[in-house]
């Protein structure tokens, strides 16, 4: 028996959901996601989903608590409407950086979010570039973890005519990501020795590797306040890099991020549309946005058709 494929989305990133729908040649299903006057989330599914294979596309990006509650309530509404299977498609997983205890008496919020999604009734998760791969283990349901860098970023970087390129990881945790892209670009690898004194603040200490006279590309999974990025760029510039570009999958770009990027020697910041960017941020002149809709759309198609998605885990 085949089940109808239905795509739903909240208010977090409807343009991405519409791109995915266009790739799959199915419409975004009709649902109302609104607010009561006191701020509570209201969801009304306006079409039949009984027995359907439902995919809810919702990055839990800023405002994180609002988008997370939208996702949970949409899942609950679909479960109570007798959907056959509900897959949460998370282009960006909020609270992912709180994935372990680094101090006494602090939460593991990434695990709490996983518990909330399961309690709401989700059957499967499709995630893009989790901050930490072990978050997959927080779930007791199947998780498909995709990587946008090797699929989306490499083709773009190949067109940049990089001279003697070197891929730079801004911290030890991102070495595997940078190495995977460096291998496909036949580029060298460098690492920033970073020490963080408090949340949201980082100090780049040393550069491990050679960037002198070369084109450097900083690779990270997300760019939030751009503090880590600017510290890395400062260290790279000090060591004599010819050009400096940056790639980040998730463009959180909160607080002073845009101003910091503009004031830095970064030639270009390449990000994806996993998080919707405001027109002001897009117009900053240094930010290039690539789409992840074909990658997510193909994964959704394969999951729906019960085909392997392992070839997408490059």
Image (cartoon, rainbow, N blue to C red):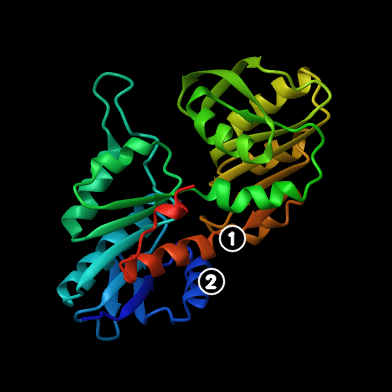
In the foreground, 265 or 66: 265
Is residue 225 in sight in this rendering?
no
Q: Where is residue 104, by image quadrant? A: top left
What residue is drawn where x is 75% and y is 33%? 165
In the picture provided, is 215 more to the left or to the right than 281?
right
What residue is drawn where x is 27% and y is 46%? 113
List x then y, in percent, for residue 212.
80, 20
Q: Where is residue 108, by image quadrant? A: top left
Q: Earlier in the sequence, mark 1 or mark 2?
A: 2
Instruction: Answer few, some or many: residues within 10 Å of disc 1's Cα (few below 14, many 20 plus, some between 14 and 19).
Output: some
For the image, the number of numbered tags is: 2
Q: Is residue 67 above or below residue 82?
A: above
Q: Which mark is residue 19?
A: 2
What residue is drawn where x is 18% and y is 70%? 79
- Quarter the N terminus occupies: bottom left
Q: Is residue 53 above or below residue 136?
A: below
In the picture provided, is 121 more to the left or to the right than 195?
left
Outermost residue toward the bottom in this view: 47
Outermost residue toward the top in this view: 206
Q: Which mark is residue 73?
A: none
List x then y, in percent, for residue 245.
73, 38
Q: Are marks 1 and 2 in contact (CB under 8 Å)?
A: yes
Is residue 13 in sight in this rendering?
yes
Judging by the rendered image, the residue that carries numbered circle 1 is 291
List x then y, in percent, for residue 50.
19, 81
In whole angstroms, how far apart are the C-alphas of marks 1 and 2?
9 Å
In the foreground, 280 or 8: 8
């Amino acid at each position: 028996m085949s089940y109808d494929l239905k795509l739903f989305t909240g208010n977090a990133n409807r343009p991405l959901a519409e791109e995915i729908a266009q790739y799959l040649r199915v419409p975004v299903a009709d649902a109302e996601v609104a607010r009561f006057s006191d701020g509570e989330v209201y969801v009304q599914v306006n079409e039949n989903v009984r027995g359907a294979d439902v995919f809810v596309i919702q990055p839990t990006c800023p405002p994180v608590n609002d988008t997370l509650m939208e996702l949970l309530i949409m899942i609950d509404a679909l479960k109570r409407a007798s959907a056959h299977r509900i897959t949460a498609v998370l282009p960006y997983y909020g609270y992912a950086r709180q994935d372990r205890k680094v101090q006494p008496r602090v939460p593991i919020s990434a695990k709490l979010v996983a518990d909330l999604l399961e309690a709401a009734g989700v059957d499967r998760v499709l995630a893009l570039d989790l901050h930490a791969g072990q978050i997959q283990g927080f779930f007791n349901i199947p998780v498909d973890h995709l990587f946008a860098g090797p699929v989306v970023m490499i083709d773009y970087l190949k067109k940049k005519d990089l001279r003697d390129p070197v891929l730079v990881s801004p911290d030890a945790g991102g070495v595997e990501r940078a190495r995977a892209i460096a291998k496909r670009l036949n580029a060298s690898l460098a690492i920033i020795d970073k020490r963080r004194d408090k949340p949201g603040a980082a100090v780049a200490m040393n550069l491990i590797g050679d960037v002198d006279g070369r084109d450097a590309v900083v690779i990270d999974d997300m760019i939030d306040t751009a503090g880590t990025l600017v510290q890395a760029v400062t260290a790279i510039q000090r060591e004599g890099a010819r050009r400096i570009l940056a790639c980040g999958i998730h463009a959180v770009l909160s607080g002073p991020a845009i101003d910091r990027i503009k004031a830095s020697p970064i030639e270009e910041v390449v990000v994806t549309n996993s998080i919707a960017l405001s027109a002001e941020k897009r117009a900053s002149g240094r930010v290039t946005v690539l789409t992840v809709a074909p990658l997510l759309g193909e994964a959704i198609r394969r999951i729906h058709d019960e085909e392997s998605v392992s070839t997408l885990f490059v």
